[in-house]
Amino acid sequence: MRLLEKKETNWSTIAPYLDTLLLPVYHYQMVQKELYLEEASLIEYITEELEKRLIGRMLLLPAYSMIGNDYKLLQCMVDNAKKELVHSGFHYTFLVILEGNWEENSLNTPFHLLTVKKEAEKEMELERLYEEVLQIWQSA
């Protein structure tokens, strides 16, 4: 389910089955009125397809998008999301980020990171991340 498509009348029947939040995070650049949205397109595609495959259990949140690649800003976003989501009632939160654009190994986060590889074929990446989510769910 996608947050922005949530219907108030159905929420009370669907909510008990949703236990996972999916939060896409990406940056983009603008130079001389030229938009560079390759990362955004890839992350949006992966998260939308994951949500479709795992419908009924996962809530896709609107993306955190940033102009530029400011690691400190990302850490502030993660810290804020941690404060806001701690009492959300969801058992899992996955951040979806692009490999190499964030210092994912040093990112201080209580969330699960799904790192999309830049050079991989989209469908193979989707399958790999799908399996990663299933593995995390099964190991809990």
Image: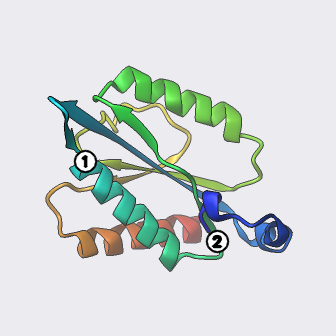
Asked which quadrant contains residue 124, the reply is bottom left
- How far apart are the two marked residues, 2 and 1, measured between alpha carbons? 29 Å
Tell me which label, 2 or 1, sits earlier in the chain.
1
- Quadrant occupied by the C terminus: bottom right
Question: Looking at the image, which residue is at 23% across and 56% down?
Answer: 117
Between residue 14 and residue 31, name the one nearer to us.
Answer: 31
The kind of secondary structure element at disc 1 is: loop
User: In the visual, does 50 lie left or right of 103?
Assistant: right
Residue 37 numbered mark, or none: 1
Residue at 32% in and 38% down: 27
What kind of residue is marked 1?
A: Leu
> What is the x, y in percent for residue 26?
35, 43
**Residue under label 2:** 57
Residue drawn at (51%, 69%) of the image: 51
- Mark 1, other Cα within 10 Å: few <14 / some 14–19 / many ≥20: few
Q: How many marks?
A: 2
Q: Quadrant of residue 105?
A: top left
Looking at numbered disc 2 in the image, what kind of residue is underneath it?
Arg
**Badge number at residue 9:** none
Query: Is residue 129 positioned above or below 61 on the image?
Result: below
Q: Is residue 66 left or right of residue 1?
A: left
Q: Quadrant of residue 16?
A: bottom right
Measuring from the top left, give residue 8's x and y in whole percent.
Answer: 81, 64
Residue 17, placed above or below residue 107: below
Residue 80 place in picture, x, y as percent: 60, 29
- Element type at mark 2: loop
Q: Is residue 69 left or right of residue 135?
A: left
Name the foreground residue: 128 vs 88.
88
* The residue positioned farthest toward the front in the image shown: 33
Residue 31 position, x and y percent, is: 16, 30
Q: Quadrant of the N terminus?
A: bottom right
